[in-house]
Image (tube, rainbow, N blue to C red):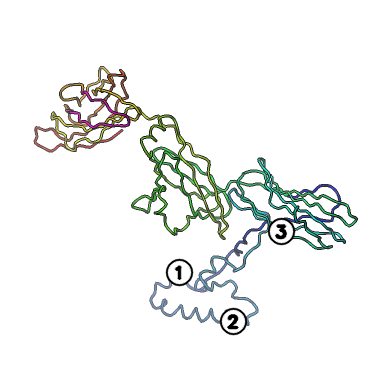
């Protein structure tokens, strides 16, 4: 859309967007000659398969005679590629088209002299105005265009990397001397809107999933979708077709060439999965203090005919993780458990803080006064553990005994700090399935389901 200041001017701007042509596609309505005479299963007959193709080929050659001015063969499928509808022609853009964030806006601007006399000393300026800034694209103040003859024109090309969404205005101005020596000022405004080509949705638990959706009307070929983790994170991209994931943090192992990923027009989607890990114990402390910046995505793509685009997301924020100061977890339970026989559970106690904690006591808590525990501690009901240093951990074994067959639950393993007089959350319940009792001299099988 163009607007011009009121008044009579000898000059006028014409703006054309420079972009690659598209393929001219004719809706295919082509017929294979064999389909006109025989069914698709005719070639199941060996005799027909041997004799029919040469016969049809000879008839097709005759019908393609260039002297036939009736064009009777124009609907025949001469080659399988004809079904695609490509005419071999390229189509120039018929409109200004859509402009998307991350693309390079390239415009061919022509200033035309529509009068019957020459204009002189023309100073031309072109700039992009957005809601936030003005970007100068061209300024001939230091070297004005000497003259433009009657009916002539002066052409130039401007480019701008689009980095903002919303309304944009291309402002073209000319300051020139008219035929009578009057100094005139011509402004023209060309407005367009920049849309978002992609929507990026992330889902963060143990992993970060980036869902890239194509909002444009053309196919996009993703050259690069790379996650740049924040300093306290390391990121590994996970791919279904690889035995071992590729580490984003090491640039030496990148492929020299990898085929682009196609995301189809009008809502096509491709998902990327990244595994995030804290880089060091210091990073764990940063998470305790509430830092939840994960990183950002660098995205580059090309359209059907190779026009490039690039986009960088804002910092992606994860759900704040309330890291436990003291964490108790089960590392291993024996694969064989017998009724009324003690067994050892391998546990780990980790200190996620920068100061020393302990000593500790470990016991089985009672959720309800009426609840009967069928898996209990064997021996002393309280186990004492020594102090754990800052960002340190300790492994220990707890002796338990099962007193009942069937599906039983290990529940209520609890740890408390005797110095701080603080009790931490109990471990999630673990279910144990006992298949047979020990007195039958049969092997007891164990299946463990973590909740």
- How many angstroms separate mark 2 from mark 1 (CA)? 27 Å
Name the quadrant of the C terminus: top left
Per the image, the residue denoted by label 3 is 156
**Judging from the image, what secondary structure is the residue with disc 3 in?**
strand
Per the image, the residue denoted by label 2 is 65
Q: Nearer the viewer, residue 359 or 311?
A: 359
* Numbered range of the magenta stretch: 383-400
Q: Is residue 47 above or below residue 140?
A: below
**Residue 393 is a magenta residue:** yes
For label 3, count other residues whose C-alpha is less than 10 Å away and answer few (under 14), some (14-19) or many (20+): few
**Residue 69 is a magenta residue:** no
Q: Residue at x 85, y 61 (%)?
A: 118
For label 2, count other residues whose C-alpha is less than 10 Å away and answer few (under 14), some (14-19) or many (20+): few
Q: Earlier in the sequence, mark 2 or mark 1?
A: 1
**Closer to the eye: label 3 or 1:** 3
**Judging from the image, what secondary structure is the residue with disc 2 in?**
loop
438 left or right, relative to 109:
left
Residue 40, label in figure: 1
User: Residue 420's image quarter?
Assistant: top left
């Amino acid at each position: 859309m163009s607007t011009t200041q009121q008044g009579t001017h000898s000059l006028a701007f014409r703006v054309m967007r420079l972009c690659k042509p598209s393929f001219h596609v004719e809706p295919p309505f082509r017929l294979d000659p064999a389909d006109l005479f025989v069914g698709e299963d005719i070639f199941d007959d060996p005799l027909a398969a041997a004799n029919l193709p040469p016969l049809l080929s000879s008839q097709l050659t005759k019908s393609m005679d260039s002297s036939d001015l009736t064009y009777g063969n124009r609907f025949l499928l001469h080659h399988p590629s004809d079904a695609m509808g490509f005419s071999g022609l390229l189509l120039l853009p018929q409109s200004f088209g859509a402009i998307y964030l991350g693309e390079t806006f390239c415009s061919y601007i022509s200033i035309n002299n529509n009068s019957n006399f020459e204009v002189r000393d023309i100073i031309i300026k072109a700039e992009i105005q957005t809601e936030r800034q003005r970007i100068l694209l061209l300024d001939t103040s230091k070297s004005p265009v000497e003259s433009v003859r009657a009916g002539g024109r002066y052409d130039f090309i401007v480019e701008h990397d689009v980095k903002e969404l919303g309304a944009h205005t291309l402002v073209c101005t000319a300051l020139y001397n008219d035929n009578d020596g009057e100094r005139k000022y011509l402004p023209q405004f060309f407005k367009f809107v920049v849309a978002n080509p992609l929507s990026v949705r992330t889902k963060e638990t143990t992993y970060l999933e980036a869902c890239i959706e194509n909002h444009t009307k053309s196919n996009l070929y993703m050259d690069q979708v790379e996650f740049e983790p924040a300093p306290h994170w390391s990121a590994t991209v996970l791919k279904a077709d690889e035995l071992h994931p590729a580490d984003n943090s090491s640039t030496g192992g990148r492929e020299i060439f990898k085929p682009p990923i196609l995301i189809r027009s009008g809502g096509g989607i491709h998902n990327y999965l990244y595994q995030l890990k804290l880089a060091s114990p210091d990073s764990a402390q940063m998470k305790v203090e509430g830092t939840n910046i994960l990183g950002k995505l660098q995205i580059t793509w090309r359209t059907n005919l190779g026009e490039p685009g690039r986009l960088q997301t804002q910092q992606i924020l994860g759900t704040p993780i309330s890291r436990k100061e003291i964490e108790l977890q089960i590392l291993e339970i024996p694969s064989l458990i017998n009724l009324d026989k003690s067994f050892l559970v391998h546990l780990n106690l980790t200190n996620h803080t920068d100061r020393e904690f302990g000593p500790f006591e470990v016991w089985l808590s009672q959720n309800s006064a009426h609840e009967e525990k069928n898996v209990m501690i064997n021996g002393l009901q309280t186990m004492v553990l020594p102090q754990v240093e800052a960002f340190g951990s300790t492994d220990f074994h707890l002796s338990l005994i099962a007193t009942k067959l069937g599906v039983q639950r290990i529940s209520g393993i609890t740890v408390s700090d005797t110095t701080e007089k603080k009790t931490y959350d109990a471990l999630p319940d673990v279910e144990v399935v006992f298949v047979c009792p020990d007195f039958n001299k049969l092997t007891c099988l164990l299946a463990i389901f973590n909740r």
